[in-house]
Amino acid sequence: MVVGTPSGFRDILPQEALARERITGTVRKVFSSHGYLPVETPLLESKDAIERAGRVKGAPFQLFDVDGSLLMLRPDLTLPIARLVATRVDKGELPVRLRYEAPVVREESSLKGQPRQFTQLGVELVGEEGAAAEREVVQLLAEALSELNVPDWRIVLGSVTPIKALLDVCAPTPEFREKALSLVHDSDLVSFDELVNEAVEQGHLGKSPAEALRRIPRLSGGAEVVDTLDDLLDRAGVAPERRGTSELARLVDSLSELFSQGRASFDFSIINSFDYYTGIIFKAYAEGIAASLASGGRYDAVLDNLGCANTAACGFALSLERLQEILGEPGESGVVTPGVRLAERPLRIAVPKGSLLKDSIRVLEAAGLPVEGLRDPGRQLTVREGDYEYVIVRAQDAPAFVGHGGCDCGICGRDSLVEADMDVLQLVDLGYGGCRFVVAEPRSKAGVAERNYAWRGTVRVATKYPRITQAYYDSIGQQVDIVTLHGNIELGPIVGMTDRIVDITATGTTLRENDLVVVDEVMSCTARFFAGPAAYRCDKRIRDLAARLAEVVGREDQ
């Protein structure tokens, strides 16, 4: 028996610890030079107190105290420090500049091949005038990245204000507003477009607001984006004082050097965490890494939830582990490993083999990409065609290849994206590979599932798609026991192992041949083009390809 650390946790030996100290020391020196003072918060926090402040990022580890109260291991540092300021800092002492370097833990990450403990190096500026705080914090992040010699770093900014103001004006119902924000938060721009289009077709949403809704999450570029955003909101009927564009324009002016150097840009696909952030949001990226190096923003609402009304707050956290990755400092060499610039390597696309391959080749070719080598790749797993490299994968694996940075973008069915639950941006509905998820049971056993549910309090279901199945039963308010199988799902209820199945069907032939009948529809699926957030926000080639694919689909629909 090997005695090791729990899954998602690891030991750090002296050589790596020294490398981490070097990075941490550089960041600490930058923060301290601007007057930021160190604070420490407990590893354990009251769950009620933290959730009062704002929605908790990631799934936290939880445990009961001896008095029965629920505690949690901190999943980030911003909410605990907001709690500290609200309870320990007098209003007259504001503004305060605080810095920290501490580990956080999240429970769910190990299921996606990620560590469950990582270290954040961050700052929080509380009580400073909002615009000044935003400028100071973004400039501080830029200085830290420069001092670390992070290669080809850039800071991408967005804001939650414009789309929230737009929905306040045009959302036909509160349910529409909530659903729209949820889809943008989940980076599912395809389903977001479908929601908007449906509202237009039903006469519930005007043309100009609909155009603004579709375009804002896809807006990106330099300072000129603010004028485009202002024009969209103006035509949609949003009052000037509610748009947030004047604040963005002032931010551009104050960060003019970063924008002119190409170190700062806008990308409104990062407008998420609507119940947490209240103004600008920003992330730092570097070429050669599939995740952000830092993230932060304006979070006045958190202080407001804790009883500190009208108190501006802005901050960010750097990931020490991702800094190690990009700096080539795992502790073995201690030297920077130069990355390959995006412009110097091919765009890597995950292409699904099997039933989706033929149509994927067709749309890629129609979008102007060379695909000859894809038609008959033989046993090759990767195919290089000029400025593109195709990675041939199972459709179910495409989200993992993109989400973990093995590929920049990819194609697969919506079902694979939902089941994988990776952090990717869903960009274009390609329209082929149509199928649907259904709940089915043997015709001869009609009513059995209901009787079993009545006495057992749960329905037993066989499926290859446990996440989709769980989400469906959650949506209808039924408890479910899921039996995960990898093939011949239909056998589950036939042999009496389960009551029903949740499976994918295109024609229904297999269901009919096994005398199974559909009792409910779960969702419909088609192929989608998607990308990793870091690649999408740093590599213009992905945006261009998404636009060309959308044009191809548009022509085919005419």
Image: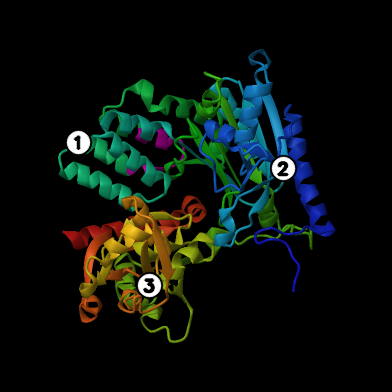
Q: For mark 1, what is the residue?
A: 206
Residue 123, percent across and down? 66, 34
First of labels 1, 2 by sequence position: 2
Tell me the kind of residue under disc 3. Answer: Pro
Q: Which disc, if any, is residue 102?
A: 2
Residue 418 lies left or right of residue 443; in this view the side is right
Q: What kind of residue is marked 1?
A: Gly
- Which quadrant does the C terminus fall into? bottom left
Residue 259 falls inside the magenta stretch:
no
Q: Does label 2 or label 3 sit earlier along the sequence?
A: 2
Distance from the alpha carbon under mark 2 to that under mark 3: 48 Å
> At which x and y percent is residue 374?
39, 78
Q: Which amino acid type corresponds to the residue marked 2 in the rendered image?
A: Ala
In reply to whether residue 225 is colored magenta, the answer given is: yes
Q: Nearer the viewer, mark 2 or mark 3?
A: 2
| Mark 1 surroundings within 10 Å by alpha-carbon count, few (fewer than 14), some (14 through 19), many (20 or more) | some
Which of the labelled discs sits on residue 370, or is there none?
3
Kindly give the residue lying farthest to the top in the view shown: 92
> Magenta part of the protein: which range?
215-229
